[in-house]
Amino acid sequence: MAETTHHQALKQALKASQSWWDGMGVDVPPAPPTSPKALKKQPQFARKPAPATKITPPAEPELSDRLVKAEAIAKAAPTLDALKQALEDFDAGVLSDHAQKMVFARGNPQADIMAIGEAPGRQEDETGLPFVGEAGKLLDKMFAAIKLGASNLYITNVCNWRPPGNRNPSEEELALCQPFIRRHIELVAPKIVIIGGGVSQQALTGKTGIMKTRGQWQDLKIGNNEFPAMPLYHPAFLLRRPELKKHAWHDLLAIQRQLSEL
Ligand code: URA
C-alpha cells in the first residue's frame, strides 16, 4: 500500500474509534501520532541488528525552544493569511500531531467584534472552523439576540487544535498558542474582544474566576494597543447551566451599549 493511502486508512480507523468513544462520553487517551510529519519524529525500526552502543532517538524540541519559535513566527506574520499559514506549518507537539485540522477562524475579519473561545471540539476538528457544534449554535443565537450576525462577528479560539480526548489545553499548550492569538488580535484590531469562558480568560489576561469576572470590562494590552474586552460565560457552560443565561443576557446588553457608543 502506498504510504499516503496507508496513512489515510490508519487515520480513518483511528477517527472512527475516537468518535465511537466520544459518542459514549468517554475521554479517549491520546492516540499514537499518524501523520507522516509526526511519524518521522518516532524512532525508526532498525533494519540491521542494533549496534552495541546505545542510540538515543531524536529528541523532541524543548518547550522553551518551541515557545521562542512560536513567538518569532507569530510576530513575523504580516497578514491574517500569513498567520494562518504559519499555524498550519507549526509543530505544536501533541496538539498538532493528534488534531485532524488546525482551526483558525470564521466570520468577518473586518467586524467590530472578535469573540475568542477556548479550543476546538470534535466538529470543529473535522471542519476546521471554530464554534460549529452545539456551543457554536448557542453562541450564534446569543449574538443574534443583540443583532450581531456573521458579518458583524469574527470568531476564533485561544488554542487552534483540538486537544486529544477533548481535554482542556494544558498551561504549556496555551503558552505555546499565546503568541498566535495575540498576533491574531493585533491583525484583526477589533473594537471589542469577547472572551468566551475561563480558559480563554486565563490565557488572555492571566485572570481566573470567570464566575466573578464575567460582565466586567477589562483592558487587554497587546503591544502598544489596548482592546476593551468583556469576559462571558462559555456557551458550552451555559448549555449545562441554563439558569445562568440571564447573566449572559445582562452581559450581552452591556456589549450592545458599548457598541452603540463607538
Ligand atoms: N468550544 C470552544 O471554545 N471553541 C470551539 O471552537 C468549540 C467549542
Image (cartoon, helix red, strand yellow):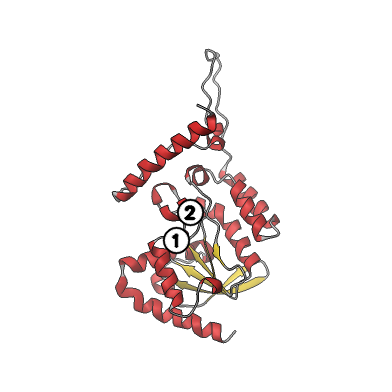
Q: How many marks?
A: 2
Whether 39 is drawn above or below 65: the answer is above
Front residue of 52 and 118: 118
Label 2: state its secondary structure.
helix
Front residue of 63 and 9: 9
Whether 253 is drawn above or below 11: the answer is below
Residue 194 is situated, as x and y percent measured from the top left of the image, at 51, 71
Residue located at (60% from left, 57% from top): 180
Residue hosting label 1: 132
Which numbered dot is residue 127?
2
Distance from label 1 to label 2 (Cα)?
A: 8 Å
Residue located at (60% from left, 65% from top): 185
Disc 1 to disc 2: CB gap under 8 Å: yes
In primary-sequence order, the first of circles 1 and 2 is 2
Corner quadrant of residue 105:
bottom right
The answer to whether residue 29 is visible is no
Say whether mark 1 is within 8 Å of ligand 1.
yes
Identified by mark 2, the residue type is: Thr
Identified by mark 1, the residue type is: Val
Residue 42 is situated, as x and y percent measured from the top left of the image, at 52, 31
